[in-house]
Image: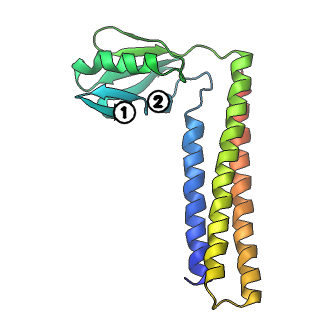
Amino acid sequence: MNPNQIVEATKAKLATATEHFKQELKKLRTGRANPSMVENVIVEAYGQQMPLKAVGSIIVPEAQLLQITPFDPNNLQPIAEAIRNDQALGLTPTDDGRVVRIQIPPLTTETREQMVKSVGQKVEDCMIIARQIRHEALHTAEKDKTISKDDHFHFEKQIDELLTKHKTEVETLAKEKEQEIMTV
C-alpha cells in the first residue's frame, strides 16, 4: 500500500469510530425519551434472541414516554420482560394488551453525574480505538520499505493531524452531550 492509500484507509476507520461513538452517545438518557435507548434490548422471540427493533416499532408520543408496538401481539410479554430485566436501563414498562409504554423518569443530580462519567468513559474508549488505528497505519507504513525517511516523517504528520481532528470532533460531541445531560 502506498502512503496515500494508508491515509485514506485511516480516514475511513476514524470516521467509523466517530460514528460508533455517536451511536453510543444516543443510548445515554438525557431525561427525554429516545428510541435508541431500548432498540438494542435483546428479546426472546420465536425461540431466538432478537433486538427489540426487529420485533416491534418504537415511537416517542411524548417527551417522557416511549411506546413500543409489537409486530406480532404474541411478543408483547417478552418485550416487556426484556426491558424490565435489563438492569442497565432501570425502566419499568407497562402494557395494555396492545402496546408497551415506558415512562421515562426525570434524572436526579446523582444520575446526571453518573451519565457524565459514562460519557467520559465512552470518549476514552473511542480515543483508544483511534490510537490503535494510528498504530496500525504507522506499522503498515513501516513494513513498506519503499518509503523514504522524509516521506515517512510527512506520512506520520498526516496521520497525527487526522487523529487530532478526530479527537477534537469527539470532544465536541462529548461536551454537547454533557451539556444536554446536565440541563434540567
Badge 1, how many Cα within 10 Å: few under 14, some, many 20+? some
Residue at horizontal 61 percent and vertical 21 percent from the top: 31
The amino acid type, in three-letter code, at marker 1 is Lys
Residue placed under numbered mark 2 in the picture: 35
In-image side of 102 versus 139 (left or right): left
Instruction: For the C terminus, give its image quadrant.
Output: top right
Residue at horizontal 60 percent and vertical 52 percent from the top: 18
Choose the circle earlier in sequence order: 1 or 2. 2
Q: Quadrant of residue 17?
A: bottom right
Which element type, helix, strand or loop, lies under badge 2?
helix
- Estimate the spatial distance between the alpha carbons at disc 1 and disc 2, rounded to whole Å: 9 Å
Colour setting: rainbow
The image shows residue 166 at horizontal and vertical percentages of: 68, 58
The image shows residue 158 at horizontal and vertical percentages of: 71, 74
Q: Which mark is residue 53?
A: 1
The image shows residue 88 at horizontal and vertical percentages of: 55, 24
> Marks 2 and 1: in contact by CB < 8 Å?
yes
The amino acid type, in three-letter code, at marker 2 is Pro
Mark 1 or 2: the one toward you: 1
In-image side of 51 versus 103 (left or right): left
Q: Quadrant of residue 27?
A: top right
Q: Which of the pair 88/163 is nearer the observer?
A: 88
In-image side of 176 versus 81 (left or right): right
The image shows residue 155 at horizontal and vertical percentages of: 70, 79
